[in-house]
Image (tube, rainbow, N blue to C red):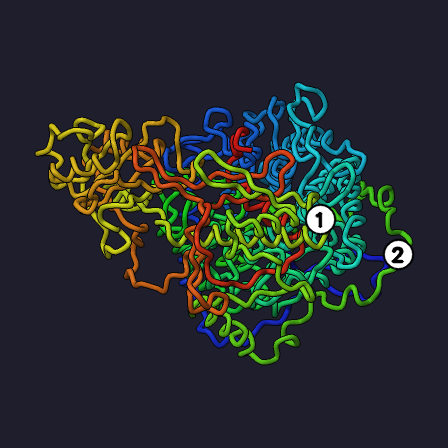
Amino acid sequence: MWGLWMLPSATMLHSFLLLLLIGTFIRLSEPMTREEKNKLRNQVLEMFDHAYHNYMDHAYPADELMPLTCRGRVRGLEPSRGDIDDALGKFSLTLIDTLDTLALLNKTAEFEEAVRRVVTDVRLDNDIVVSVFETNIRVLGGLLGGHSMAVMLKDSGQMLWYQDELLHMARDLGLRLLPAFNTSSGLPYPRVNLRHGVRGPETRTGTETETCTACAGTIILEFAALSRFTGDPTFEAHARRALDFLWEKRQRNSNLVGTTINIHSGEWVRRDSGVGAGIDSYYEYLMKAYILLGDDQFLQRFNTHYASIMKYISQPPLLLDVHIHKPLLPARSWMDSLLAFFPGLQVLKGDIRPAIETHEMLYQVTKKHNFLPEAFTTDFRVHWAQHPLRPEFAESTYFLYKATKDPYYLEVGRTILENLNRFARVPCGFAAMKDVRTGSHEDRMDSFFLAEMFKYLFLLFAEEEDLPFNVEDYVFTTEAHLLPLSLSTASNSPLSLVINNMAGEELDDANFEWTCPNTRLLFPDPAFPRNLREPIRSAVDKSCPRPAAIREPGMGHPPLRAQDFMANNPEHLELLRRMGVSLIHLKDGRVQLVQHATQAVSDVAAEDGMRFMQEMMELSSQQQKEQLPPRAVQIVSHPFFGRVVLTAGPAQFGLDLSKSSSGVRGFVTVAEPYNGCSELSNAEIVAGRIALLQRGQCMFAEKARHIQKAGAIGGIVIDDNEGSSSDTVPLFQMAGDGRNNEEVILPLLFLFHKEGNILLEALKEYREVEVLLSDKARDRGTDGAEEEDCSTEEKDNSSPASSEPLNQSKVTTQEQVAEDSVAGQESVQPAEGLGSYVPVDVGEEPAGDRDSNSQSGDSLMAEWQEDLEAFKQMEKDEL
């Protein structure tokens, strides 16, 4: 958060105001009327109530709401989602995360009731392993933000009963997190047991050796606030020590930090550097620690990093990861959605121009896909299709409006509101998007949606008199919790005890040269912001061109191109051996390529091998365009009205829904027999409807023939494997049975057990349930105009990077299963002692030529490790 305030500083003779963005643009866009703003503000409040009350009615005291099934998510009772579940600690996470949102939105009575519930119901002494990072920003931050609001209300004559109960809970939680910092480096373990700490077998943690930079560097605001609220310097001292260590371990030539670091040795594990996932809030907290604590050291560090970010990572409007040791080399060709916070941080810094440019790029991507995909490529196609209702884009929109007062950003906010209501709203709250391309949902509403999204949207549309307090007196944490700036002068400040690492360093004027200029001076031409946005809008709206590959100077081509590789060519096998690449023969007749950089004949050969493996990975991903994308089952009858969308697997036979402008719409009924493996006994009921079938006992195509003979207009096969879900199992497609499948003309889709059960429960409760089978969810309330498809990560043959069509058939990542099973993504993941590997078929003809990406070995390995985490471990006997 930012506002108009002066911070104490002994070394700064300039006397400037942080974020004194007093200038406003003379706007060319039409201003939004006060009536319109009030209407949108009230819409934000209604949406918040819909989400919050559904959590309280259906989920509390569970940590989170599952909005599709209208129940709470309790860790251990639901299928594990891996690291995501480390945020859950059986401490009513969503309620704590929402406390100061209630206060900011003028819901004083509900805030007071929520504080009473937290104090009465929540227990922190749970034998459960949680993420130190998530628990700090969400729970500790939520308790401190709630305490700040309670104190503010008490000072105004309300909540006179409050006696710092939330602060006492915050101190208790802080003490439970402290054991994680018991390392030689001062970097915290990534996880801690709330009851037992990190030592001993009963903790079930403490064996980790690495953590992300943001995980270790996003502690200082909450821990320093806790120290200054309580007078105990211990917490701030530990957070400062972790930040000091990260600063010392930065790459001294590039002044960049990597993504993950060994908490014991300080060696960088992943050496790619960006402003998105894994690093993002480390930079944010350096700037905000200066704002909150008034320590010039933090500003100096931030400005040093920021100069390197703008030199190496920023390629306006793009922000692309690079390698910390070779920062001129891109580490990947895609961006993740978490970087959407960065334009807001640039506003805080006062660097408005690149903030406008990057924000506009993000807005255009949002308009293409309705939401920001979790990751998208440099030509703005989907890389990872999920969207868990992240608030970072709304955050940056608010900051840019606050700084410029340009009504353009109010219209951006309106778009965010409309998309949330049209695509994410369901009867029991708001559901995360499982796939922005199809509009399918995930049974998930994270606590940050209530903690952050509605704060920023409310502030965007609210007038000053709508706010219960002056937000300029607070700083927003990365979870948007409110900490008072008065902490900077707290008498119990332990600054003198803990600042020691840089006491001898002097601050140069250059460290402050870009801090908070007046925007009138920065943009004297009122048309300038629009001129910045127009070319970016045009670039995204056009044909999504892929930029030419960037080469490392002097490296040239690897000796063997992936497109040319033949597994039965002795020369190729020898070249692979020299590059440290070996072959493993799989049971299904294919071979696995495995790269051991240490077995290459030289460092140059090892890098050649890594580039070869990267090319093979890219060929593998190119095969996606030969595969059918996911389909959607949209429940359109009362009371759903199209707001529940289930991810469905397609069939390789029957009606192609992508070629149907309207899809197939009809009421569902259960086939008898349910497995559909013989002629239906209830054919007269099935006729003219969509038949529900159970997987098993016969081929998919046979089921389709039987329901088609009965007069069905479509079919949905539901998995018989209890607990299966599209949340945890890769997309698949149903294959034919080897017979003449052209006779099947109806559409057949597949739902996993969890999604299918939602449909069956709806049918049980409402009896008449109508669904729409389509290639993607139909917009609830738009004209349905077709846009150019930039939704998938595939290259147009006419684009500069692909002058010839490629034969992708030789790189296999998907099986087509004819029997009653599914064709899913090939599961590969680095195993113990292995590098990167991809499966390939043997003996195919070489594909057309293609430029290689001359990236360094370390940067490529970092990217593979991240991408390969999406696949399963291979069976040991295949290794």
Q: Is residue 508 left or right of residue 74?
A: right
To which residue does mark 2 refer? Answer: 505
Query: Looking at the image, which residue is at 27% across and 35% down?
Result: 717
| Amino acid type for the residue under numbered disc 1 | Val
Residue ID for mark 1: 601
Marked residue nearer the N-terminal end (1 or 2): 2
Picture coordinates of residue 180 (x, y %)? Answer: 72, 32
Q: Nearer the viewer, residue 203 or 641?
A: 203
495 in relation to 95, above or below: below
Q: Is residue 549 left or right of residue 229?
A: left
- Picture residue at 52% right of the left edge, 32% below the top: 878
Relative horizontal placement of residue 300, taking residue 276 as reference (left or right):
right
Q: Measuring 41% from the left and 63% from the top, which residue is drawn there?
A: 35
Rate crowding at label 1 as few (under 14), some (14 to 19) or many (20 or more) other CA atoms within 10 Å.
few
- How many marks the image carries: the answer is 2
- Residue 266 appears in the rendering: yes
* Residue, far top: 202
